[in-house]
Every structure is written in C-alpha cells, then in structure tokens.
Image (cartoon, rainbow, N blue to C red):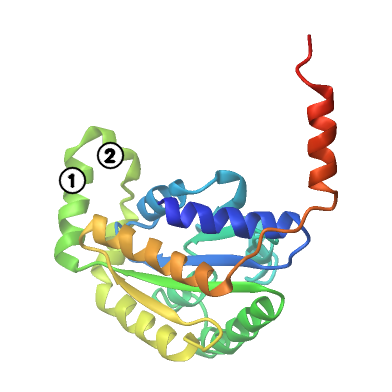
Amino acid sequence: GDRLAKLQEALYAEGVGGGNRSVLLVLQGMDTSGKGGTVGHVLGLVNPMGVRYAGFKKPTAAEARHHYLWRIREQLPVPGQVGVFDRSHYEDILVPRVRKLIPAAEWRKRYAEINEFEQELTGAGTTIVKVFLDISPEEQLRRLKARLETPAKWWKYNPADLDARAQWNDYQKAYADIFANTSTPAAPWYAVPADHKWYRNWLVARLLIETIEEMAPKFPPANFDPGAELKKLEGVGVPG
C-alpha cells in the first residue's frame, strides 16, 4: 500500500506540474467477480484526490442517443489521475453479442473501433491496464447464495444475475474473442484469478505498481527558489 501510494502521489504531482500522463485501470468480469471490491481495496490505498472512478451499467436513454464510446470519453482520467472503470466499453460488445441485441457484423466491427480508441488514448499519454477478474462458476454460486442469505447483502443482488449465469458459456466465449481481438501491445489484457479476494487485490495492486514504476513519474521542479523562501519563512518567525 505504501509503495503504491508513493507512486500515485508522484504521478499526481507530475500532472499538477503540467505533465500529460495518466493511468486507466479497466475491470471486467462476471457478476460477483469483485470489481467493486477491487476498487475499494486497491484504490483505497491511495490518495482519492488522484483517483477517478466510473461505473458503467446499462446505458441511459440520453447515453443511448450517442455513439457507445461517448459516455466512456466523458469519464476518462485527466493528467495525473489513476482512472478506474468498473465495467467499461467492452460491455458494448459482450451484452449485445450474448443477448443478440444487434447484428453480429455490428459488434464485430467494435473490436477495431475500440483498438483505435485505445491507441488514441495511449498516444495522448494514458497507460491502459485491462484486467479480467476470472471467477469460477462454483465460487460465483457461493457468492450469489451468500447475497441471498444475508439481508445486509440483498442490495447487491439483481435477479438478472441469474440470467447471465445461465449464459455463462456464451459470456466466456465472448470474453475469449475479446482477448484475442483487443489485447494489443499498447493495451494488453491481464487475467487475474478472482476466487480468492486477497490474491485478487494483491495482484491488481502489483499490476498498478509495476505499471507506474515503469512510467517513472517525476515530482515537478519548484517554480520558485526554495532557499530564498526558507529564509523568508525563518525571518517571519512564529506569529505572536
């Protein structure tokens, strides 16, 4: 946690100082895989001032009137921030494909559109870390049962989760095709085992640490003379 916090502080300071770099963590996975838990445990280790969170559910009527990437662009991190997407633009391939909401030709062309979009982001200074939280069907069953058996977890349960579970194999195939078509040198996918929450959190934190270490953010130089300011401060003394 300390290591990640120090790296994130340097990235945030670099952005405040005029840098153009940021990080975007994309979290995808089946229901109960722990997207929200990962956000809370991993991003909770750093200064919230430097974090931008966005969760993407079914598009609203207003969002649906735009191109599917419109609402994604509205939530991108600014320089210095670590952005995190709880679900993302990949939902616009997954859900339409599995539920047969649009023709296959339409969702297939989105592979290239998303690759171009992510290439644009990386070219502008955003490093993208795409994580698939890989939960087993057995562990998902256990977590869904826990939600139904625990009143304090009822708010997390959605009857539609069972519909998605019934289409488990279709979603797995859709994810496999996404990885094959959109894991690029500029924006690779990482599969993170998610049955054990502690390991999931540790591994995502490690990915962020390694990513930001490779970026090597620098604290900006002072735009004043620190020595002169120190002398002025000492001259002021303690207000009486």
Residue 129 makes an appearance in the image: yes
Q: Quadrant of the rendered structure where residue 138 is?
A: bottom left
Dot 2 amino acid type: Lys
Q: Quadrant of the C terminus?
A: top right
* Percent of width and height locating residue 192: 31, 71
Give the residue displayed 68% in from the left and 67% down from the top: 70
Residue, disc 1: 146
Find out whether the residues at labels 1 and 2 contact each other: C-beta distance under 8 Å. yes
Expressed as whole percent of the image width and height from the top left, the position of residue 115 reads 58, 85
Is 224 drawn above or below residue 155 in the view shown? below
In primary-sequence order, the first of circles 1 and 2 is 1
Residue closest to the eye, 65 or 123: 123
Q: CA distance from mark 1 to mark 2?
A: 8 Å
Element on which disc 2 rests = helix
The residue type indicated by label 1 comes to Ala
Kindly identify which residue carries mark 2: 153
Can see residue 59? no
Q: Tell me: 210 left or right of 116.
A: left
Q: Residue at x 78, y 37 (%)?
A: 230
What percent of the width, then of the height, locates residue 231? 82, 35
Mark on residue 171? none
